[in-house]
Image: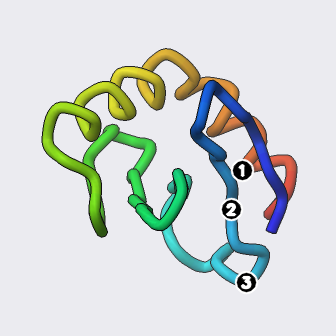
Amino acid sequence: MPTVLRDGPYRFYFYSHEGSEPPHVHVDRDDRSAKFWLDPVVVGRNVGFRMVELGRIERLVRAHQTVFLESWHDYFG
């Protein structure tokens, strides 16, 4: 599970076996988890994040979208 970014309490990463899916990133904090599709940026799954925090995370994903997409394509080819 390559970690792409850490920002405050959040860890953004990929699962190494998900290269057949469209580009996305997972984010964890404590016992909460979410999945964001990257093009376009859309919440794919949310487990435990409140809407306000999920919005904050979405803004981070948008701010780092290019880095996430480049990392995805570098890792999965």
Percent position of residue 52, x then y: 17, 32
* Closest to the observer, 59 or 65: 59
Under mark 3, the amino acid is His
Given this view, does label 2 or label 1 mark the residue nearer the observer? Answer: 2
**In whole angstroms, how far apart are the C-alphas of marks 3 and 1?**
12 Å
Query: Tag 1, which secondary structure?
Result: helix
* Closest to the observer, 13 or 30: 30
Looking at the figure, which quarter contains the C terminus?
bottom right
Looking at the figure, which quarter contains the N terminus?
bottom right
Disc 2 vs disc 1: Cβ atoms closer than 8 Å?
yes
The structure residue drawn at horizontal position 33% and vertical position 39%, both measured from the top left corner, is: 41
Q: Which residue is mark 1?
A: 72
Asked whether, in this view, residue 19 is left or right of residue 57, the answer is: right
**In whole angstroms, how far apart are the C-alphas of marks 2 and 1?**
8 Å
Under mark 1, the amino acid is Trp
Q: Is residue 25 above or below residue 10?
A: below
Disc 3 vs disc 1: Cβ atoms closer than 8 Å?
no
**In whole angstroms, how far apart are the C-alphas of marks 2 and 3?**
9 Å
Percent position of residue 39, x then y: 40, 42
Percent position of residue 22, x then y: 49, 64
The structure residue drawn at horizontal position 59% and vertical position 36%, both measured from the top left corner, is: 9
The structure residue drawn at horizontal position 65% and vertical position 37%, both measured from the top left corner, is: 68
Asked whether, in this view, residue 75 is left or right of residue 21, the answer is: right
Q: Which residue is mark 3?
A: 17
First in sequence, mark 2 or 1: give its number.
2
Q: Which residue is mark 2?
A: 14
Q: Is residue 14 above or below residue 12?
A: below
